[in-house]
Amino acid sequence: MKVLVPVKRVIDYNVKVRVKSDGSGVDLANVKMSMNPFDEIAVEEAIRLKEAGAADEVIAVSIGVKQAQETLRTALAMGADWAILVVAANDVHQDIEPLAVAKILAKIVEEEGARLVLSGKQAIDNDMNATGQMLSALLGWSQATFASDLKIEGEHAVVTR
């Protein structure tokens, strides 16, 4: 079974953000970026499934700017088998709407034949918690949110909340 894990590049959670002097947004100059911590948990869980024999491949996917390659390298270093980068923005200040991300992910799930998607519960940059639910609806799949435990039993996932 292939497991797909979306990972998002966000401002590192240890960084104290600064607002631009004109008040138009966050100053991203020389700010450390990293993988969304909740996505990191999803990558770890996918790797655990692979190590337990419940998954064959772990595919990390990031959608955004070219610099998201760094986030994908982190997922690969953690144990993901391979990674896909979809460059969907040229400006690091541009955020991509959750529905657009979900549509791109749905296409990748279909093309790669992934049978399970593990996503972090939300991104720490906007706390929307929307992409996973939209993806589930687009695929016509069942979903579980805010899971604390996951077991694969045959063709079924057993989730504890």
Image: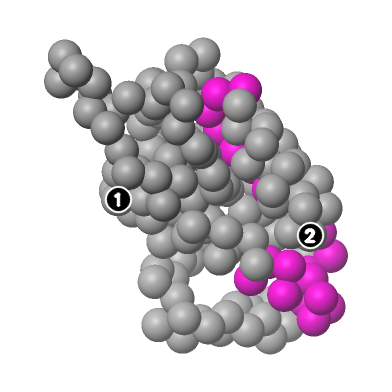
- Give the alpha-carbon distance from disc 2 to disc 1, as whole Å: 26 Å
Lower sequence index among marks 2 and 1: 2
Identify the residue under disc 1: 127
On screen, residue 37 above or below 146: above
Magenta region includes residue 139: no
Amino acid beneath label 2 = Gly
Identify the residue under disc 2: 79
Q: In the rendering, at what x and y percent does residue 75 appear?
A: 70, 51
Secondary structure, mark 2, is loop
Magenta region includes residue 50: yes
On screen, residue 148 versus residue 67, left or right, reads left
Q: In the rendering, at what x and y percent does residue 151 appear?
A: 63, 84
Q: Nearer the viewer, residue 74 or 19?
A: 19
Image: magenta residue range? 45-66
Q: Rate crowding at label 1 as few (under 14), some (14 to 19) or many (20 or more) other CA atoms within 10 Å.
A: few
Secondary structure, mark 1, is loop
On screen, residue 52 above or below 112: below
Q: Quadrant of residue 56?
A: bottom right
Q: Is residue 116 visible?
A: no
Q: Quadrant of residue 104?
A: top right
Amino acid beneath label 1 = Asp
Q: Is residue 25 visible?
A: yes
Q: In the rendering, at what x and y percent does residue 114 appear?
A: 70, 54
